[in-house]
Image: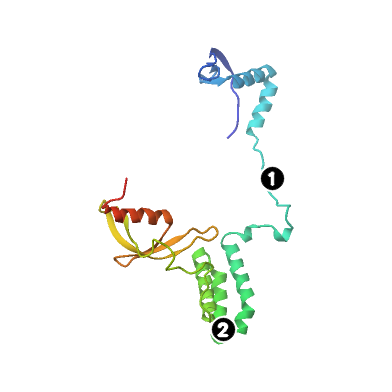
Amino acid sequence: DEGGHTLGLITRWLPADEASGDGALFHAVHDDGDEEDLEEDEAAEAAVLEALGAEARAAAAECARTRLVQPKYENKQLKKGERAEAGHLGVEGARAEIGALEQALLPGLRAAGSRWVAPKARIRVRWLQSLDEAERASELAASLVELEQHLRELQSAADVSERKPWRSDAHEWLRRSVRRFFWLKSEQRWLCTDASVGSWLPAEGSDVALWHVTHDDGDEEDLEEHEVAIALEHYSEGRTEPLP
């Protein structure tokens, strides 16, 4: 859109209201019939432009039409090889990361005699082709899961959890009954279900403590401390609905 200018005349004004904090306003009527209310700084700027004459107004209009060009961003804090580029993002970036992961795992897969590298199976050949042809994140995810499955085939030890195992002792809430409520939107009512606390996982680092409960209908869930506390109260008080 091209900028422009129009001349006008200030016909009246509204003094500032110190009580409300509203600034002064100046009512301007333009030559083309339009009207507007200007704040003090806007009125002052318009008066200055008018005083400067036609040449200055033309220059101001040209400035209004000129779009500022944002310079291309370049991360100069890192070496060129370490800078993030378009190819490192999105599907292309994920494809490159998965390919690099497979390359890093390849020596170990060969040493373990995995079917992944068996010439007759051609599993890796087909996988690399699928990875190269993937166009969506979901397709890349499928490739990653397939790679993981072949790695798990070689696993001889049980999975190791970074957290300590669940405990079935040393807490007063164990084997206590709790009551939970779940809102059934389709029926517009609360579902009441009782459960029993079977084990707990003490807090560790930034991970909060958890209590594992098994419901009478067989469902299971892990609750945080405040959730167990209110569920114990619900059961002990015999509530049929949660507190508002």
Please name the residue shown 32% across and 57% down the image: 180
Helix, strand or loop for disc 2? loop
Q: Nearer the viewer, residue 147 or 4?
A: 147
Dots 1, 2 in contact, CB < 8 A: no
Q: Which residue is mark 1?
A: 71
Looking at the image, the residue that sits furthest to the top is 12
Where residue 53 appears, as percent x and y from the top left, is 68, 19
Q: What residue type is disc 1 on?
A: Pro
Q: How many marks?
A: 2
Where residue 191 appears, as percent x and y from the top left, is 28, 56
Q: Is residue 179 above or below residue 168?
A: above
Q: What residue type is disc 2 on?
A: Ser
Front: mark 1 or 2: 2
Q: CA distance from mark 1 to mark 2?
A: 51 Å
Q: Earlier in the sequence, mark 1 or mark 2?
A: 1
Q: Which residue is mark 2?
A: 114
Label disc, if present, on residue 230 of the rendered structure: none
Please name the residue shown 70% across and 23% down the image: 55
Where residue 215 appears, as percent x and y from the top left, is 32, 64
Query: Where, by quadrant of the figure, is residue 171 drawn?
Result: bottom left
Q: Quadrant of the N terminus?
A: top right
Q: Is residue 183 visible?
A: no
Q: Nearer the viewer, residue 228 or 135?
A: 228
